[in-house]
Image (cartoon, helix red, strand yellow):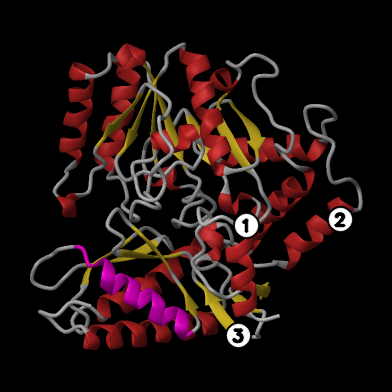
Amino acid sequence: MNNAMLEERRNAATPRGVGVMCAFYAESALNAEIWDVEGHRYIDFAAGIAVLNTGHRHPKLMAAIEAQQEKFTHTCYQVVPYESYVTLAERINQLTPGSHAKKTAFFSSGAEAVENAIKIARAATRRGAVIAFSGGFHGRTMMGMALTGKVAPYKIGFGPFPSEIYRAPFPVERHGVSSGDSIQALHGLFKSDVDPKRVAAIIIEPVQGEGGFYQAPREFMQALRAICDEHGILLIADEIQTGFARTGKLFAMEHYDVLPDLMTIAKSLAGGMPLSAVCGRAEIMDAPAPGGLGGTYAGNPVAIASAHAVLEVIAEENLIERANVLGERLTKRLHELRRAVPQIADVRGPGAMVAVEFTRPGTGEPDADFTKRVQASALAAGLLLLTCGSHGNVIRFLFPLTISDALMDEALDILDSVLLESAKSCPPPLTC
């Protein structure tokens, strides 16, 4: 079987709505490398969209998964509970920011965590409205799409969406939106669109993922907390992409002197197993009545076992510090390229949640074509990259934090070569 044959079968058997980036098919993977069915190797700087901070098939995770499979694979926690769920909840309660009493419930996907965070917030406040931000991404369910601040490809043809969702601009200085502008817009919402006493929650990604790896400024997050406190609104931190050492902290909210009321976590929580969670203040988490939360597969025991192993790997291999070291190496290399690659407009991100933004030299306009060219050339050279941003002109780097130094150097050399060649092929004032 080869890639072309599998691609033909995919097109015949699966719907076009499930978009697929690569035309090759995975056969095996280990740490930060993937091999396709034809034996080609790729360095994985996508990590399943931030799911594999601990890499593909980490031995500790594999051992934990195999050990749990020898005991049982499913009971449905709401029917027959198990200790590992309770123990993981205790660990998450302790590791998330703040020393206040917390409780955690587990689910299966990031979107499911977001849905349940909104349910919990509405139950706790007895209010219906929710405020989200432009450029934010919160999932592909109906509520997730309503909260997401990007139309294509996520919302086209799927409306109408749940009501009482309001949106404010996310502060991005380079795009002319200051923290003050965003706060003013929130106050404007309260005057023209929704009574703050009707708002259950404000949900925000501390660092926007799909939106372009823009980090919320400290002063903005502090002002947001003050607004929530003033009006009895709950602050939900969506840490689905930012969690588990990616930003150089275990959670991105640790970069702020601000505590959220609820947090959604998923992706690297279980290192490739489907698991998500909502963690929050105990009294808020207890608002839904018994039976109001859960799911048939929520908190699957195999995924729970993998999550315990993830937390051990992060601690034992010092992946928080590793994220900072690797992020600094990447950003240094990108900054060194800026003179030779004038399309590089910005290099940003905390820890290893790094992005590079491309614009047309001389105009400052987003250059999605150049971005696609870099991505395609990197893939042809064996380096897997993801794009993001409202204009599709940002490349985000999500390599496993367990990547070896030698493999990181090889990947950075490929990136150097691809960026220089792409810039040479599109010298100003030409565009790709």
Left or right of residue 27: residue 195? left
Check disc 1 and give the amino acid type. Answer: Ala
* Residue segment shown in magenta: 366-381
Which of the 4 image quadrants contains residue 187?
top left
Q: Earlier in the sequence, mark 2 or mark 3?
A: 3
* Disc 2/disc 1 C-alpha distance (Å): 21 Å
Q: Earlier in the sequence, mark 2 or mark 1?
A: 2
Q: Nearer the viewer, residue 416 or 245?
A: 416
Quadrant where the N terminus is found in the figure: bottom right
Left or right of residue 349: residue 269? right
Q: Is residue 83 magenta?
A: no
Q: Nearer the viewer, residue 355 or 314?
A: 355
The residue that mark 2 highlights is 67
Q: Give SS at disc 3.
A: loop
Check disc 3 and give the amino acid type. Answer: His
Check disc 2 and give the amino acid type. Answer: Ala
Residue 382 position (above or below residue 318): below
The residue that mark 1 highlights is 315
Type of secondary structure dominating the magenta stretch: helix
| Image location of residue 119, percent across then percent down | 53, 23
* Disc 1/disc 3 C-alpha distance (Å): 33 Å
Badge 2: how crowded within 10 Å, few (<14), some, or many (20+)? few
| Image location of residue 247, percent across then percent down | 44, 56
The answer to whether one can see residue 98 in this image is no
Q: Residue at x 60, y 38 (%)?
A: 277
Residue 316 position (above or below residue 336): above
